[in-house]
Amino acid sequence: MPDVQALVNDFLNKLKKRKIEGSQATAKQTAELLRSVISQQRVPYTNQAGALIDSVRAIGEQLIAANPIELAVGNIVRRVLHIIREEDLSLTTAAVTELNLSTISDDDDDDGGGNQDDHPVLSAAAVAAAARSSLRPPSLQMLLEGAPEFVAVPRSSSSGGDSEGKSKSMDRNSRTRKLKHDVIEAVNELIQDITTCHELIAEQAVEHIHQNEVILTLGSSKTVLEFLCAAKEKKRSFRVFVAEGAPRYQGHLLAKELAARGLQTTVITDSAVFAMISRVNMVIVGSHAVMANGGVIAPVGMNMVALAAQKHAVPFVVLAGIHKLCPLYPHNPEVLLNELRSPSELLDFGEFSDCLDFGSGDGSPLLHVVNPTFDYVPPKVVSLFITDTGGHNPSYMYRLIADYYSADDLVVQRRHSAVN
Amino acid sequence: MSLTHAVKEHKERRKKDNNAVMTMVIKKSKPSPVIHQSRLGTDELFMAIDPDTKQLLCYEERGEHPRGAISLENSLLADNPSISLHNDKQDCYIDICSQEVLSLFTDNFDYQHLRRHFVKGLLVDDIMGYKIFTHEIHSSYAARIDNYRSYDTISKDIIQRWTYPFVPDVRFSANCTTKLEREGMYKAPEIQQSRSAHIGPFTVIGKGTRIGDDSRITHSVIGEGCTIGSNVSIVGSYIWNNVTIEDGCELRHAIVCDGVIIKAAATLEPGVVLSFKVVIGREFVVPAYSKVSLFQQPTAQDSDEELEYADSSSGAIDPSIADAGNKLNGDIVSESSQIQDWSTSQLGPGGAGFIWSACDGGCEEEWRHSVAPIPTDQLAKALLAIEEDSEIVKVSDSALTPSGELEPGSDDDDSDNMDDSNVDTVDFEKEAEATFLRAAQDNIAVDDLILEMNSLRLSYNKSAGDCTGALFYPMMKLALESPHNTAVELQKNVASVVSKWHKLFEVLAKEVDDQIELIMKFEEMCLESTKEFAPIFSQILYLLYEREIIGEEAILRWDDERKDADESDRVFVKQSEKFIQWLREADEEED
């Protein structure tokens, strides 16, 4: 698949050179890339889901390693893996139903073990076939033997004649194509969701912003922009304080946009947040990622705003598309909470080049400039999360993970064929 | 840096002006004022750039102008409406060239050095009219490594993340993920580090390295697969892959290449470079700024190619191949015996390799281009040199003028400004004296002397007052020199001299101010050099008045001026008080 490899390499390069800005753009491009990978992936006759999952995992591992701070990449990889499992599960369910068997209990939760016991009595061969060719929670035998075995179509155990076998194989063929087709459809839906997350969040603006309120925000977030403008459309009149968000000063851009759309805007420095917080009714901010415990990874300075809000009992509302929800906890060693960027955003290199002269003294730099990109905001200072699906408590966020992710995928690493 | 912007600019400029053949990328970086060297160990660079069009007009390296003075051509200033002169720019050695550059190199086949020959040639050349432009980068980073100091500086810049996103913890090569911890420490996976080892700030440790007990590593870069023993101290060094450092070693500001083995308790002093696979013996101290290699230093350097072969082959050539035919100097022992018999090597017991002595002519400047920071004694020397330079400017000319004037430097505040004029005055006075004496000796007529004095005065751009002062002194001296016993006789002598030369003064001392100047000069003379005149001051004053050399107005004004002066100044005034009194009465009588 040379085409796909070229695409993957291209995307990897962009990630490594930090050319893609913003979790929404990253998520969308990741999803599109994975869609291409899936569509070009040749699946074997059996256990096609396994093959798909392996290939997605392999590429996903590279993508995550290229930019570990961009958690949206990992999120989308896990979402796609979850989609594959889901689709496979639903297809298996349908197949078993086709065989005129009562439905297998539909477990979304992959952790629910011991499903075999819940099955009604079936012909053992069919059950075995179904179990082997899908990715249900593994039986003890499979656990002991490691990776799910790629068992050939149970021709040997087929209880029917050739015609049945043929029809079964026909089913499998169509099922192969159907799986890929379904998965790709689901990924398309995912891309659609990512693209439209702003609108879904903005629809809820009217419930939260009331007349004559003062809103504070930091830096620039497209979600926040759409949110505020939607409230304006609904004829709410309110004022916005924008903290500029040093060192990139993206707050300036946001202020310009808001003023262009007719909102009364005030620009303040980050250091003035504590001074102005007493005049503010609500703080509404965007985020980079939301962790499983409800903590937020947000642009630098956000923790300060959150603490100011807490101290003055101002509600701190975080807007996050569901693609930003990460199934990992902040204490997970894989998670990098921060990334230090180039100090040239803070200081001009030329002006300070005489402080950076390593030739004198003992060669150690006397001037060290640190430029962190993100802040971690603990869940207890966040009042509300507004996502595509509505408003949630920070302590509720972990429940959403189960809807979107599978437990097997939390560590996106290729499983080696040999047992560890 | 991203080249897109620079290339786009170059292309647009080229569309408008066909002569714009090259765009040079530059970056602001201040050189060190003490040792006159940029951060990267290159000489200070001087550039003249047109601020509107960004054209490069002049490019000079300080090495050719050791005193730090550059001479610019007039045409440079005449042809360009505005120029800005910079010495805080660093040449990134990234040039975006058009096709003409290649043809220029074909035409001038003896261009060897890009900047010294090609750029200078292009700037000086008027015929073709090719222009070089500059592109300044601000937040991006670009630099060239061409000596050890720039290797050190740029490594430290990368560790400090000025080159983001090209930093050690972004996974560009597909092997491992290095993590950035606090205080600038980069650690790759699978490091085995003893609990008591201390890894300090701004270090990069590669994959699979083992570090023993109580070792201290700070400000260094360590490669993959290294084995570092216990009690090792590594400061500011660059250690490449697969190096073995045994217990108790000490490395300061050194570069150690692949596969080196450093045996126990060895010490590397600052600035040492160990080439590939060298072995340093036990307890051996490698002297500072030395370079050690498995191959002997090539001595007979007939041509550059030989040296290049030697450099490129070090560390890569299999000893057996080297044995076969590579004889750079006559006294190479055959390689095979070298491998077996290292016991007599220069590097201590068990060592293997040769220390290359510093190349001739470069050993004084080793510290400039080395990985080690500049030693404090060199810095002190450089600082001292700067102070001496500034002192020379302040020391004023201390020559004693012949007319006995006080030293200009002792009283005045702005003695510096008066240096030049004082030198001139001294010369002038000497000339005047010489002229007068010659005239006196050779009995030249007064008119001729007047002519001579005038021409002298004009040539020295002096006023008449200066002239009178200058002449009065030798005249009085002449009077003094003629034999006399008493003051009266002296007075007579003066009278005779004055009568002889009074016409001179009539011409020169016409203005009142000049006459006052004369009186004051006489005062000074009486105080300082020719004290014999002191008692007869008033008499001589009267004499001069008689002879109409000085008028009453001058005397009266002199008296007025001295009214507020100190007692010491008024000595002569008191002496001549009777005379002045008489003058005043005469005035009143006239009125």
Image: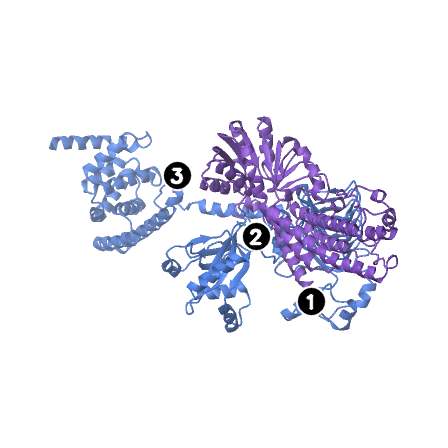
For label 1, count other residues whose C-alpha is less than 10 Å away and answer few (under 14), some (14-19) or many (20+): some
Q: Are marks 1 and 2 in contact (CB under 8 Å)?
A: no
Q: Chain of mark 2?
A: B
Q: Nearer the viewer's eye, disc 1 or disc 2?
A: 2
Q: Secondary structure at mark 1?
A: helix
Q: Secondary structure at mark 2?
A: loop
* Viewer-side residue, B278 vs B107: B107
On the image, numbered disc 2 is attached to which residue?
B141
Find chain A in the image and tell me its colour.
purple
The amino acid pointed to by label 3 is Asp
Q: Amino acid at mark 2?
A: Tyr
Query: How far apart are the two marked residues, 1 and 3, measured between alpha carbons?
Result: 64 Å
**Chain coloured blue:** B
Disc 1 chain ID: B
In the rendered image, which residue does mark 3 sit on?
B413
For numbered disc 3, what is the local secondary structure? loop
Q: Label 3 vs label 2: CA separation?
A: 50 Å
> Where does residue B465 sit, x and y in percent of width and height?
26, 45
Nearer mark to the viewer, of 1 and 3: 1
Q: How is the rendered protein coloured?
A: by chain
Relative to B532, say whether B123 is above or below.
Answer: below
Question: Mark 1 highlights which residue?
Answer: B310
Whether tag 3 and tag 2 are in contact, CB under 8 A, the answer is no
Residue A349 falls left or right of residue B191: left
Q: Is residue B148 left or right of residue B318?
A: left
**Percent position (x, y) of residue B228?**
78, 49
Using the rendered image, report if marks 1 and 3 lie on a common chain. yes
